[in-house]
Image (spheres, rainbow, N blue to C red):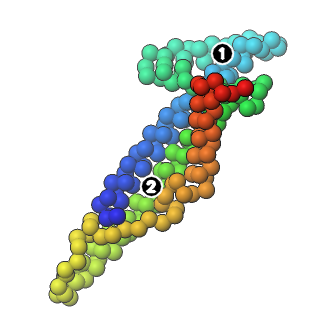
Amino acid sequence: MSIHKALKKEKRQRYFGIVLMFISLILIIFGLLKTLYRLLLSDETAFSSITNSIAALIDLFYQFTQFLIFGWFWEIAPTIDLSKILSTYNLKFLACISLLGLGMIMRDSARKLSERLNRTIERAEERGWEKEITGEQDNSKTIMQLEFKYRAEERWQTRPMGILFLAIIAGYVVSLLAKITGLNA
């Protein structure tokens, strides 16, 4: 792969990782707020007046963010079901956490790739300047056409945590497909 294509891939990977992190972080925050709201409303202790005021603040935040695109995020945000550990809600929440981790790994891999690409470009430019100063004939390719090979840490899908997060997300997708098709017992 040429350096030009590697630079494009690095930018795509970085932006996709950031978008993935942003979306999953919103889903996690809204899911935690929904879970907290549900738990606070069911509180019957002596602190119920405090918990009701916190629930009112969460409801106010919900009303302010409902009209934006965040309203859709409120609907699909996963809640945590404390009564059943392996419920669909908990798997959905775990999938959101896995998406956040996957976005972080993608961004980190893009950062490492970017650093290595910049070092390679600098070395190629220095080599070109040396040849220009010494008067050697330069029949080599331009810098952006140089061949470039990826290392393992620059591929997010081959890193151990990337594989783990992909497996968790795949598990949720299989669970969701089983629920849609009616195969779960």
Q: Amino acid at mark 2?
A: Ala
Q: Is residue 108 left or right of residue 54?
A: left
Q: Earlier in the sequence, mark 2 or mark 1?
A: 1
Q: Is residue 125 among what the camera can see?
A: yes
Is disc 2 surrounded by few (<14), some (14 to 19) or many (20+) residues within 10 Å?
A: many
Task: Tell me where residue 21 appears, x and y as whole percent.
Answer: 51, 40
- Point out the frontmost of discs 2 and 1: 2
Q: Is residue 137 left or right of residue 174?
A: left
Q: Residue 116 lies in what quarter of the image?
A: bottom left
Q: Amino acid at mark 1?
A: Ala
For the N terminus, the image quarter is bottom left
Q: Is residue 48 above or below residue 174?
A: above
- Can you identify the residue that label 1 sits on? 55
Q: Is residue 132 left or right of residue 160?
A: left
For the C terminus, the image quarter is top right
Q: Is residue 32 among what the camera can see?
A: no
Task: Tell me where residue 42 appears, x and y as whole percent.
Answer: 75, 13
- Give the Cα separation between the discs numbered 2 and 1: 40 Å
| Residue drawn at point x = 54 percent, y = 35 percent | 25
Count of number-bearing discs: 2
| Residue drawn at point x = 59 percent, y = 25 percent | 180
Q: Is residue 114 above or below residue 33?
A: below
- Can you identify the residue that label 2 sits on? 110
Task: Tell me where residue 84 appears, x and y as whole percent.
Answer: 77, 27
